[in-house]
């Protein structure tokens, strides 16, 4: 559970912290964080700094659910989709090692092939019930001013739906409970990266290098550049909320609190 966070105008503020109306700078970490991500490299770009920080400073267990095999992520015509998929799995393992993720689950859907199906929802639900995260991370599937990759939208929607309502109800995918020995699980919050309206910020200045190296591990996706050039690009990008937050480098998320277990929730669903 996220605790002791620094609040904006409506709550207590730690001395020297930057905060403001309508956003929160989070300085603690979840016990278990599960990132549902469409393609190899999306997770590192979206939340690699936060995950690396949480793992190193708080001992968070980080798990990555990789939805597709990224087998279309090339302009090299001679490279077969099978070979590319195999390469990207190796790259993803290396990237997740740098971040410090404990586990990666590969669902291996074809690149561009994600649909919001019962099967896909059941697979993400299974991993939520298995790893029991207090926080999930995914791409914000709801944008209004920019278009995103279909897999990004599908994976974000399915992650949110799996957390609320599938994972906590005995009635959804009951075979996971009766046959696989899993239990329902309540996820407390979702952090969505790539949002048009982020309201949660995490300081990642000490983890820019880890983020850069974890992105570089996806060698098949990298344009030619030195580590220094990439680091400076990533630092620039992470600095875009500096004026708002007062922090040099952040990762930004939109947050949903599911409110599971609250009085309102118990009244409605228990
Ligand atoms: Zn992607």
Image (tube, rainbow, N blue to C red):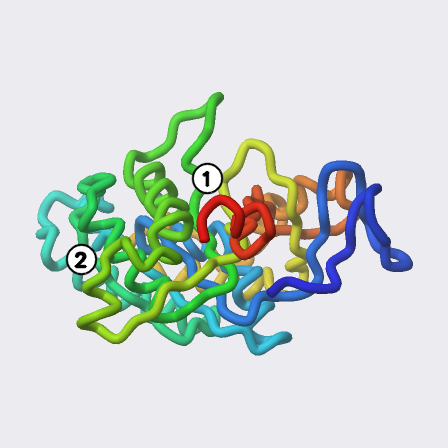
Q: Note whether ligand 1 is within 8 Å of mark 2.
A: no
Numbered label attached to residue 79: none
In front of the other: 64 or 93 = 64
Q: For mark 1, give the secondary structure.
A: loop
Pick the quarter of the image with the N terminus: bottom right
Q: CA distance from mark 1 to mark 2?
A: 25 Å
The residue drawn where x is 86% and y is 59% is: 14
* Left or right side of 254 for 221: left
Image position of 232 with respect to 127: above or below: above
The residue drawn where x is 41% and y is 48% is: 164
Q: Position of residue 222 (x, y in %)?
A: 36, 52
Image position of 198 with respect to 138: above or below: above
Instruction: Please count the marks in the image.
Output: 2
Q: Position of residue 168 (x, y in %)?
A: 39, 57
Going by the picture, which residue comes out furthest to the right? 15
In contact (CB < 8 Å): disc 1 and disc 2: no
Q: Position of residue 25 (x, y in %)?
A: 72, 52
Q: For mark 2, give the secondary structure.
A: helix
Image position of 11 with respect to 196: above or below: below
In front of the other: 145 or 168 = 168
In front of the other: 20 or 261 = 261
* Left or right side of 38 for 255: right
User: Which residue in the protein does label 2 denote?
Assistant: 85
Tell me which numbered mark, 1 or 2, is placed earlier along the sequence. 2
Crowding at mark 2 (Cα within 10 Å: few <14, some 14-19, many 20+): many
Q: Position of residue 189 (x, y in %)?
A: 54, 53
Q: Nearer the viewer, mark 1 or mark 2?
A: 1
User: Which residue in the protein does label 1 denote?
Assistant: 140
Image position of 266 with respect to 34: above or below: above
The residue drawn where x is 57% and y is 48% is: 257
Q: Is residue 17 visible?
A: yes
Q: Is residue 219 visible?
A: no
């Amino acid at each position: 559970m996220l605790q002791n966070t620094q609040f904006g105008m409506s709550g207590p503020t730690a001395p020297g912290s930057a905060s403001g109306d309508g956003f929160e700078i989070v300085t603690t970490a979840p016990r278990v964080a599960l990132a549902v991500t469409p393609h190899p490299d999306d997770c590192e770009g979206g939340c690699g700094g936060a995950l690396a920080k949480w793992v190193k400073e708080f001992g968070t267990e980080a798990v990555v659910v990789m939805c597709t095999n990224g087998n279309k992520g090339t302009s090299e015509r001679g490279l077969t989709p099978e070979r590319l998929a195999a390469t990207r799995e190796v790259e993803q393992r290396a990237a997740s090692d740098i971040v410090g993720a404990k586990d990666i689950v590969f669902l291996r859907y074809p690149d561009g092939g994600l649909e919001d199906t019962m099967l896909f929802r059941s697979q993400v639900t299974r991993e939520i019930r298995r790893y029991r995260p207090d926080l999930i991370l995914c791409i914000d599937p709801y944008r209004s001013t920019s278009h995103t990759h279909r897999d990004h939208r599908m994976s974000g929607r399915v992650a949110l739906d799996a957390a609320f309502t599938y994972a906590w109800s005995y009635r959804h995918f009951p075979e996971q409970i009766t046959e696989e020995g899993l239990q329902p699980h309540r996820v407390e919050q979702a952090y969505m990266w790539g949002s048009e309206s982020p309201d949660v910020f995490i300081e990642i200045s000490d983890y820019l290098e880890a983020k850069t190296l974890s992105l570089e591990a996806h060698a098949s996706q990298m344009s030619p550049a030195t580590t220094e050039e990439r680091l400076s690009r990533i630092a620039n990008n992470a600095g875009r909320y500096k004026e708002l937050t007062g922090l040099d480098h952040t990762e930004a998320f939109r947050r949903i609190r599911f409110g599971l277990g609250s009085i309102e929730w118990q009244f409605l669903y228990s």
